[in-house]
Image: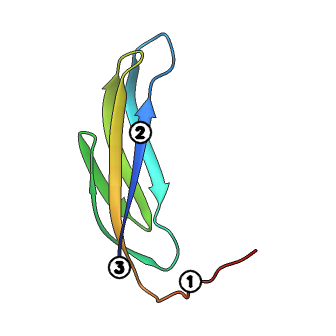
Amino acid sequence: DTIIYSMAVENVGSGTATNVTVTDVVPTNTSYASCSGGTSCSQAAGTVTWNVGTLAPGATATVSFVVSSSTSLPISATK
């Protein structure tokens, strides 16, 4: 199964943010497939990295990555 993770990154400060970088770890029991967003993105050693660049105050950038599940996990209901 394919799972897509997306994150919105916002500059909530009053100054321009430069050289913005975002990282996220590929979850356990999944396999990295691709990433998008920012000026570039890549995956190495289980961590996805996006170079977002410059964000003006109040600006938002969206980054995402796709994984596939490498195991079948049972779904159960809990109370």
- Disc 2 target residue: 8
| Residue 10: % across, % down | 44, 29
Q: Quadrant of the C terminus?
A: bottom right
Rounded to the nearest angstrom, the CA distance separating label 2 from label 3 is 23 Å
* N-term mark: 2 or 3: 3
- Disc 1 target residue: 75
Rounded to the nearest angstrom, the CA distance separating label 2 from label 1 is 29 Å
Q: Is residue 65 left or right of residue 39?
A: right
Say which mark, if any, is on residue 63: none
Identity of the amino acid at label 1?
Answer: Ile
- At x 43% / y 35%, what residue is drawn? 9
Mark 2 or mark 1, whichever is nearer to me: 1
Rounded to the nearest angstrom, the CA distance separating label 1 from label 3 is 14 Å
* N-term mark: 2 or 1: 2
Mark 2 or mark 3, whichever is nearer to me: 3
- Up-down relation of residue 74 to residue 60 (above or below): below
Identity of the amino acid at label 2?
Answer: Ala
Residue 34, by quadrant, is bottom left
Q: Secondary structure at mark 1?
A: loop
Query: How many C-alpha atoms fall within 10 Å of the one at disc 2: few (<14), some, or many (≥20)?
Result: few
